[in-house]
Image (tube, rainbow, N blue to C red):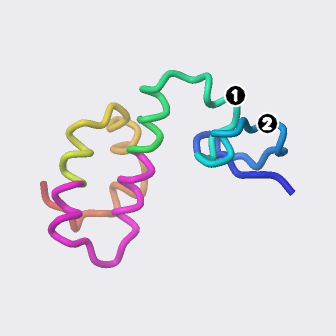
Amino acid sequence: MGHWCRICGETKANEKFSGKGHKNHICKQCALKPKEKIDEVDQTDEIFGFLKQSHISSKNIGRLKRLVQESRSIQTIEKSDFFKKSDFLDF
């Protein structure tokens, strides 16, 4: 039974995770990536998490706007089919 890495999305053996990696769900290989790359993946996941909600509160819309402005991976998000289908958000 392995653990899931939230950065690469793979299920890997316990040996592929360090002590902190188990807690944070980041494998040793992904832990070596630059912090900017890890933050980019986290921000993208958070943005898509908001977009999958059926009701987005005004507080979450404010957070979503900040994430979109700060996100370095916005080109990837804009090109995705899901974002094009989500016309309910007017920025």
Residue depicted at x 72% and y 35%: 18
Q: CA distance from mark 1 to mark 2?
A: 8 Å
Which of the 4 quarters of the picture holds residue 20? top right
Residue depicted at x 63% and y 31%: 30
Q: Amino acid at mark 1?
A: Gln
First to last magenta residue range: 44-63
Secondary structure of the residue carrying tag 1 is helix
Q: Decide which of 9, 79 is in the foreground and name it.
A: 9
Can residue 80 be found in the magenta stretch? Answer: no
Measuring from the top left, give residue 24's x and y in whole percent: 58, 46
59 relative to 85 in the view: left or right:
left
Image quarter hosting the C terminus: bottom left
Measuring from the top left, give residue 77's x and y in whole percent: 38, 44
Mark number displayed over residue 16: 2
Q: Decide which of 9, 81 is in the foreground and name it.
A: 9
When the figure is inspected, residue 77 is found, relative to residue 18, above or below; the finding is below
Measuring from the top left, give residue 38's x and y in whole percent: 49, 33
The answer to whether marks 1 and 2 mark residues whose Cβ atoms lie closer than 8 Å is: yes
Q: Residue furthest front?
A: 19
Q: Residue furthest bottom?
A: 54
Predominant SS along the magenta part:
helix
Q: Amino acid at mark 2?
A: Lys
When the figure is inspected, residue 89 is found, relative to residue 24, above or below; the finding is below
Residue depicted at x 41% and y 38%: 76
Image quarter hosting the N terminus: bottom right
Mark number displayed over residue 55: none
Residue depicted at x 37% and y 35%: 73
Q: Which residue is mark 1?
A: 29
- Near mark 2 (Cα within 10 A), the count class, few <14, some 14-19 or many ≥20, is some
